[in-house]
Amino acid sequence: MWVYFEEIDEELQAKWVLVKTNGEQRGALRFYKVSQPVERFYEEDFADLAILSIDMGELVRDPFDDYSFAVNTELVQSRLESSGYDPAMLEKAEYFIMLVEDLEEVMSVDLNLLFDKY
């Protein structure tokens, strides 16, 4: 898991989370753990990556694991189609990116406490 940090009032705050699209698949859900090791990434790291953004409504909290979440790929596919984007973008994407605050709201946890500050 990669995390992009933004400096706010001379303190690093997690802004975006980036995960590989090949999470553990269970039906239309791809699962990820926030308790996995975190690497920091920077703006220049975005340049060569095939990234697909994930909306808060496409995130699902794992009811059996407080530190696990899923991306609902059926909802992502539906959003792409209804927005006029190529639905193949889902399969071509190497990474999903989401706002930390969206993930925190879905999981009801402060992720800044879990992420090491760089």
Image: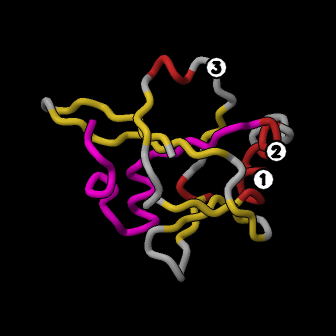
Q: Secondary structure at mark 3?
A: loop
Residue that label 2 marks: 81
x 80%, y 36%: residue: 92
Judge whether residue 117 is colored magenta. Answer: yes
> Pointer 2: residues within 10 angstroms few (<14), some, or many (20+)?
few
Q: Amino acid at mark 1?
A: Ser
Magenta range:
93-118
Q: Residue furthest bottom?
A: 64
Q: Position of residue 36 (x, y in %)?
A: 47, 56
Figure check: 59 above or below 16: below
Residue that label 3 marks: 48
In the rendering, which numbered label is found on residue 26?
A: none
Q: Amino acid at mark 2?
A: Glu
Q: Position of residue 105 (x, y in %)?
A: 40, 62
Judge whether residue 107 is colored magenta. Answer: yes
Residue that label 1 marks: 78
Q: Are marks 2 and 1 in contact (CB under 8 Å)?
A: yes
Q: Nearer the viewer, mark 3 or mark 2?
A: 3
x 74%, y 64%: residue: 25
